[in-house]
């Protein structure tokens, strides 16, 4: 049964392999806590030749949105629903409100569930993070449609000794003295493709890197490449990136660069410059290493003759992360090992006396660099201003995408990935699955954009996370930072959200607020102050 609210698709409507009806493979790749401007093909200085190559031979989206935080994004990505409809409106700490249950709902069906039911092989390597870590396995990847899984159930951890590393349904320990999680994820993903060989069965591969999420852990050979790159500081980096983005056409010249975050000093006044530059160098090295792994994945596709008829999607789960760690973090944090694998104590916290990157430290890169990652936008992960929710999206599919190398400004959202996958696979989205009634699909297929550059888009797109709220309708965006008034922006003229029009256009602000309220009632988005008490 096809969902009346989503797309309509059928096998007969999928003309992908001339005369053969061959369905495309789908490789979905996600970065973790990476900003809008970090990679080269979106204006960054970080070396990402493999992603840049996918962009050159594919399509880049400039107005693609995520869910502002790890768990909500992953729940929406896997289900094509808003996070609250999938039961993960916040994180995986269960609360008494159904939309914030913290565990992927059985009234939501996953991409691998849908594709596997239609004859696809389904594999995952990387971070899951849509179910609590406990004695249960009911919502682990192999219980939600994946045939094979290697990765972590928890949301963060050491890159040298990741918490909750698992294969299939069992926890495992890292193997080899040179274990580095980014490499392990990429190598496992590539091995799935190679082991599939020349099989005609289509496959779905979800590769969820934890790079460049804290802790700032990278291999010294990669850090070396950036050791002097950031000594000019965050102010110069933001200006440099913005100029490059303008030249490339990633952003519009009408949109000024936002001011430096008010909590961050001018670089000339910043203390601990050597340490600060090292933090950003490690962050860059983490992304560089991820790109190297993506190169191995695409090489496996090429070697197996699968690249031309594989849709590769690359995106990020939220904007750059401004979270910080006090020196010598105390308390019980399951993501932070007490010791390294060879027995040395892990010194957790943002300590300027310790240069980050090694197995025995555990640091984040801080507000100033997160501000640069999100150039030219405001705010960060957690918030739903553009800096928190704007994601790169690269789509590469030689069989279908013919107008390559450019940008597309179609407003879209990660709930579209389910709709796209099912559409191009000719896989019906069910109204019931495994005896459970399934919530109707919210996303819309991007296939028309791949074909012609446009589609019949959304009336509105919505967000809520930790009381931060937003709705976008065409060029208009109504947005609220928790505890502050609603703000209204014309994103065509002001995507960097510097000219609040709420006072000048109370009619439009009121209309959009009513729409947001109706959406919140529909999906179960509740008052955050009440939710967090439970």
Image (tube, rainbow, N blue to C red):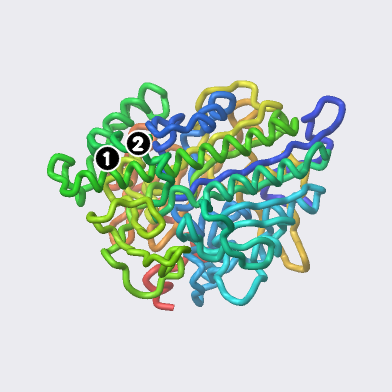
Horizontal and vertical percent position of residue 489: 34, 42
- Residue 325 placement, left or right of 57: left
Rendered location of residue 128, percent (x, y): 58, 59
Quarter of the image where one finds residue 222: top left
On screen, residue 54 above or below 181: above
Q: Mark 1 points at which residue?
A: 499
SS for dot 1: loop
Mark 1 neighbour density, 10 Å: few (under 14) some (14–19) many (20 or more): some
- Say if mark 2 contacts mark 1, CB within 8 Å: no
> In the picture shown, does residue 95 fall above or below 462?
below
Q: Distance between the residues labelled 2 and 1?
A: 36 Å
Disc 2 crowd, CA 10 A, few/some/many (<14, 14-19, 20+): many
Residue 16 placement (x, y as % from top left): 77, 30
Quadrant of the image containing the C terminus: bottom left
Image disc number at residue 226:
2
387 sits left or right of 178 in the view: left
The percent coordinates of residue 174 (x first, y second) are: 56, 59
95 above or below 270?
A: below
Image vertical order of residue 137 relative to residue 410, above or below: below
- Mark 2: secondary structure: helix
Q: In which quarter of the image is residue 255?
A: top left
Which one is earlier in the sequence, the residue at label 2 or at label 1? Answer: 2
Q: Is residue 225 left or right of residue 64?
A: left
């Amino acid at each position: 049964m096809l969902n009346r609210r989503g797309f309509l698709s059928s096998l007969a409507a999928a003309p992908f392999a001339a005369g053969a009806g061959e369905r495309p493979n789908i490789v979905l790749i996600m970065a973790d806590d990476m900003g809008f401007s970090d990679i080269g093909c979106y204006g960054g200085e970080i070396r990402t030749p493999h992603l840049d190559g996918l962009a050159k031979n594919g399509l880049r989206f400039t107005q693609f949105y995520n869910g502002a935080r790890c768990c909500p994004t992953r729940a929406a990505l896997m289900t094509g629903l808003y996070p609250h409809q999938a039961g993960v409106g916040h994180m995986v700490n269960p609360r008494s409100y159904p939309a914030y249950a913290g565990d992927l709902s059985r009234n939501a069906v996953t991409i691998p569930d849908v594709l596997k039911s239609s004859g696809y092989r389904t594999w995952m390597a990387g971070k899951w993070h849509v179910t609590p870590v406990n004695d249960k396995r009911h919502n682990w990847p192999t219980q939600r449609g994946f045939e094979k899984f290697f990765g972590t159930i928890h949301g963060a951890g050491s890159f040298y000794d990741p918490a909750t590393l698992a294969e299939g349904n069992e926890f495992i320990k890292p193997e080899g003295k040179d274990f580095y999680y980014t490499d392990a994820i990429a190598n496992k993903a590539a091995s799935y493709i190679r082991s599939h060989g020349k099989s005609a069965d289509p496959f779905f591969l979800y590769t969820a890197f934890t790079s460049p999420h804290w802790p700032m852990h990278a291999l010294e050979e990669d850090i070396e490449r950036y050791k002097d790159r950031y000594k000019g500081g965050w102010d110069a980096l933001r200006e440099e990136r913005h100029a490059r983005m303008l030249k490339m056409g990633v952003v519009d010249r009408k949109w000024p660069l936002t001011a430096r975050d008010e909590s961050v000093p001018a670089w000339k006044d910043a203390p601990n410059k050597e340490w600060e530059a090292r933090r950003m160098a490690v962050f860059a090295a983490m992304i560089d290493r991820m790109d190297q792994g993506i190169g191995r994945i695409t090489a496996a596709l090429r070697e197996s003759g699968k690249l031309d008829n594989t849709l590769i999607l690359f995106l990020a789960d939220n904007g750059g992360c401004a979270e910080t760690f006090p020196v010598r973090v105390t308390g019980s944090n399951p993501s932070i090992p007490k010791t390294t694998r060879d027995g040395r104590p892990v010194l957790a916290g943002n300590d300027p006396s310790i240069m980050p990157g090694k197995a025995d430290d555990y640091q984040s890169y801080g507000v100033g660099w997160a501000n640069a990652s999100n150039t030219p936008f405001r705010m960060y992960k957690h918030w739903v201003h553009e800096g928190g929710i704007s994601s790169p999206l690269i789509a590469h599919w030689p069989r279908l995408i013919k107008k390559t190398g450019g940008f597309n400004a179609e407003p879209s959202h990660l709930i579209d990935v389910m709709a796209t996958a099912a559409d191009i696979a000719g896989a019906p989205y069910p109204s019931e699955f495994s005896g459970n009634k399934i919530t109707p699909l919210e996303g819309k297929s991007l296939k028309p954009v791949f074909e012609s550059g446009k589609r019949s888009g959304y009336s509105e797109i919505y967000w809520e996370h930790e009381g931060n709220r937003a709705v976008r309708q065409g060029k208009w965006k109504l947005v609220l930072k928790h505890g502050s008034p609603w703000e209204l922006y014309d994103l065509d003229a002001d995507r960097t959200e510097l000219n609040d029009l709420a006072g000048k256009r109370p009619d439009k602000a009121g209309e959009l607020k009513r729409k947001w309220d109706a959406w919140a009632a529909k999906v179960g988005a509740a008052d955050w102050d009440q939710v967090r008490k439970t």
